[in-house]
Image (tube, rainbow, N blue to C red):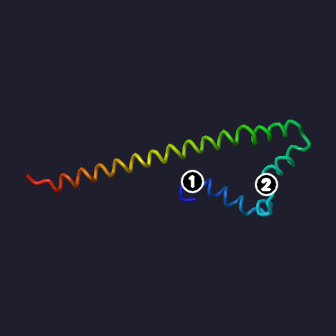
């Protein structure tokens, strides 16, 4: 979890400590249990599962790709500066 923030790390760690998570109780089973008695709750759970979560996953993917591109650009700029400094240092009139 080197590239995540502290609140996300804490959430992952607390989720991993739950017995249901270790027993393989997946999000679908939890969603089905949560909305079993109320159709409105089931509708909200379906919206989360089918609309909101995929949208956020796509946003996370796009942000990750943008950060990787920024890292590549910064690395290239640093290499150019180092190359330029090396040329200036080795050049003597």
Looking at the image, residue 70 lies above or below residue 86: above
C-alpha separation, residue under disc 1 versus residue under disc 2: 24 Å
- Residue at mark 2: 26
Q: If you read the primary sequence from the N terminus, does the residue marked by circle 1 or circle 2 appear first?
A: 1
- Residue at mark 1: 5
Q: Provide residue 73's location: percent of width, then percent of height.
A: 40, 46
Residue drawn where x is 67% and y is 57% of the image: 12
Residue 10 sits in which quadrant?
A: bottom right
Q: Provide residue 78's location: percent of width, then percent of height.
A: 33, 51
Residue drawn where x is 92% and y is 43% of the image: 37
Front label number (1 vs 2): 2
Q: Is residue 45 left or right of residue 4?
A: right
Mark 2: give few (<14), some (14-19) or many (20+) Cα within 10 Å: few
Residue drawn where x is 23% and y is 52% of the image: 85
Mark number, residue 22: none
Q: Disc count in the image? A: 2
Residue drawn where x is 48% and y is 48% of the image: 68
């Amino acid at each position: 979890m080197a590239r995540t923030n502290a609140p996300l790390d804490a959430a992952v760690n607390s989720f991993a400590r739950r017995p249901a998570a270790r027993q393989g109780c997946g999000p679908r089973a939890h969603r089905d249990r949560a909305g079993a008695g109320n159709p409105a709750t089931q509708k909200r759970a379906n919206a989360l599962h089918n609309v909101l979560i995929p949208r956020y996953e796509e946003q996370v993917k796009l942000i990750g790709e943008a950060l990787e591109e920024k890292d590549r650009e910064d690395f290239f700029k640093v290499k150019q500066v180092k190359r330029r400094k090396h040329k200036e240092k080795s050049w003597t009139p």
